[in-house]
Image: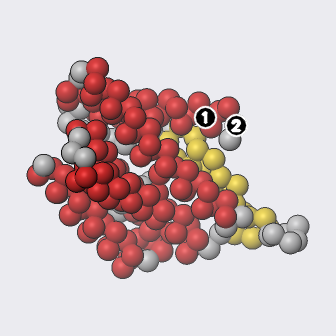
Amino acid sequence: MDKKEIRDLFVSTVVIGVLFSLSDLTVLNLVSSLIIVGIAFVFHELAHRETARKFGAAAEYRMWPAGLLTAIVLGIVSGGRIIFAAPGAVYISALKMSRWKAEYSSLTNEEYGFISAVGPLANMGLSILFLILNAVYPSNLFAMGAAINIFLAFFNLLPFPPFDGSKVMRWDRKTWLVMFLASTVGFAGALAL
C-alpha cells in the first residue's frame, strides 16, 4: 500500500466516521464511530482491492473529492441523518496481467461483478459478527458496529452507478436481489433498534 492510498483511506474514514457521529456528537460517540467506520470502511475497500488483485488486476483505493464534498454537505445540513458514504472507491485497471505470460486481457463481467459484491458482503459479515458480540456482551459499540456495517452494505448495493449494486446487478440480477433484500431487512432491523 503506497502513502497516497493510506492517506486517502485515512481521510475518507475520518470524514465518514465524523459524519456518523453528528446526530449525537459526544466524545464517546465520535471515538466509537471512528473505530467502527475504520473497521467497516477499510474492510469493505480492501475486500474490493484484494479480490481484484486475485483476478490479476491492478487496484488501489482513491478518494473521490466530489463524493467527499457531497458527504460533508449532506451530513452537516442533515445533522448526521443523511450519510452519503461514497468518499472514494477502489480503482481497478481495465486490463489484467496473465500469470504465466506477458499478455493482457480484460476482466470479465463476472469478475467485475464478484469484485463489486465482496465489499458489501464484507460489511454484512461484519454486521453479523457485531450482532453476535452484542448478544454475548451487550454494548453500544457492538450495536453501532452492526448498524453501521449493515447501512454500508445497503447503501453500496443501491442499483445506481457508481455504487457496487449497479455492477453486481449488471453481472447477475438474482445475486444482486438476494444481497439487496438481505441488506434491506438488516437495515430495517437496525432502524427498529
Picture layout, residue 189 above or below residue 178: above
**Res. 119 in view:** yes
Residue at 27 percent of width and 67 percent of height: 182
Residue 134 percent location from the top left of the image: 25, 49
Question: Mark 2–mark 1 contact, CB under 8 Å?
Answer: yes
As drawn, is 161 to the left or to the right of 30?
right
The quadrant of the image that shows the N terminus is top right
Q: Secondary structure at mark 1?
A: helix
How far, Cα to Cα, is label 2 from label 1? Answer: 6 Å
Q: Which residue is mark 2?
A: 2
179 lies left or right of 171: left
In this view, the residue in front, 189 or 74, is 189
Kind of residue at badge 1: Ile
* Label 2 neighbour load within 10 Å: few <14, some 14-19, many 20+: few
Q: Is residue 22 left or right of residue 125?
A: left
Count of residue discs: 2
Residue occupying the far left of the picture: 192
| Residue lying at 55% horizontally and 50% vertically, measured from the top left | 46
Residue 129 position, x and y percent, is: 35, 56
**9 over 57 or under it: above or below:** above
Residue 165 percent across, percent down from the top left? 39, 62
Image quarter of residue 58: bottom right
Residue in the foreground of this view, choosing between 176 and 135 = 135
Q: Which residue is mark 1?
A: 6
**Could one spot residue 67 in this view of the protein?**
no
Question: Does residue 112 sit above or below 44 in this rendering?
Answer: below
**Outermost top residue:** 27
Relative image position of residue 60 (x, y in whole percent): 63, 47
Q: How is the image coloured?
A: secondary structure
Q: Secondary structure at mark 2?
A: loop
Quadrant in the rendering for residue 144: top left
